[in-house]
Image (cartoon, rainbow, N blue to C red):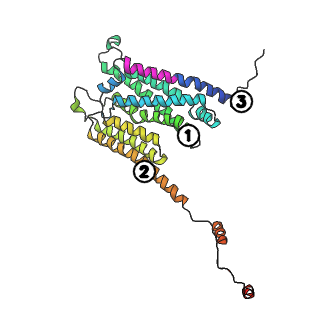
Amino acid sequence: MESLPLDISHPAVRDYLSLVRLQVLTPLSLLINIATLVVCSVIVKPSAGSIIKSHPTSISPSPNLIAAYIVAIFLGQIGYCTLLVVARKPETKTTLVKGVGLSLVYANWLMALWAICWVCRIPKTLLNLTSMRDQVLEFFLLSTILLGLLVLCLLYSNIALLTYHPPTSSRPLDTALIHAPLRFFLVLPLSLLFSYSLFITLGLYYSPDQPEHYGRFAWPGFGVTFGANLIGLVVVVMHRDIVWAVAATWICVSIWSARPKPAPVYITVILFTVLHPLALFGTLLYRQLTKQERRIALPTDEEHDTGSSNRRGPREVDAEALWSSG
């Protein structure tokens, strides 16, 4: 029995095959990412969290809060994978295939590779190294490069979504399960992980045995935290972005909760912890007030004429009828 002919070049067929490919590759990449991070955080020694403690910088976060943030990323991606399977609307399928595509798959792979490089340690005796610090620096450099690629990958997908497939109230599931997880994923490496890894690569950290040196490199930490949060604040104000406001506030809390911190960094993250939700509520309130003002509008000329014709004015008196009745 001959197989049915299938035109692979047809746009509808290509979109369908792309969707099927995403339904397979996206959950697979997510499972690999989850498994890799669990192994690097629980089984491998030193773990990902212990490296944060052993390399304190002026912007070091709380490992527990960052772990909770990553769990939230995974939960959002589980919802995204569910939508990949149950999506029925053509607009939703188009957003999944052309808006996100394989960028989330690449992002999961990059994050898994970063976790491996982050915890990977090679004994100096195997490589005849006289300084362990040099070898560790090479792996941190590789992890920084991977985080930079991760930021670019997620930034591309988010810009493509906002430009060609913006969120709409008619499809709330698209907003909750496509836009929100990708934006939440972007904020972590963009606002914190890349900068923190770069600080370690450049040697901008102090020994955990000398906590009195926590004030070293305070101003580079101030510049990074202020710049990243200022960008986030602009996004929140311009787009009334609830997801970015929550994510940026979470990052700020994770930084100031890991003490000690130099004053410039501590004051900055405390300030933006307040400013992000305040800016969000302010923009939402302003939008609501402007909507109410638009509803209160003066009647048009037609409405004025129509209303005046139905009004009861003074009646004319028929003099003949009046006198005849008498």
Q: Residues within 10 Å of mark 1 (few under 14, many from 20)?
A: few
Q: Secondary structure at mark 2?
A: helix
Please determine whether, in this image, residue 23 is positioned above or below residue 247: above
x then y, percent, for residue 171: 58, 40
Q: Amino acid at mark 2?
A: Gly
Q: Nearer the viewer, residue 183 or 323?
A: 323
As measured in the structure, the alpha-carbon distance from the residue carrying label 3 to the one carrying label 2 is 48 Å
Residue occupied by mark 2: 282
The magenta span reads 29-45
Q: Secondary structure at mark 1?
A: helix
Front label number (3 vs 1): 1
Answer left or right for 72 relative to 130: right
Residue occupied by mark 3: 10
Q: Secondary structure at mark 3?
A: loop
Front label number (2 vs 1): 1
Chief secondary structure of the magenta span? Answer: helix
Precedes in sequence: disc 2 or disc 1 = 1
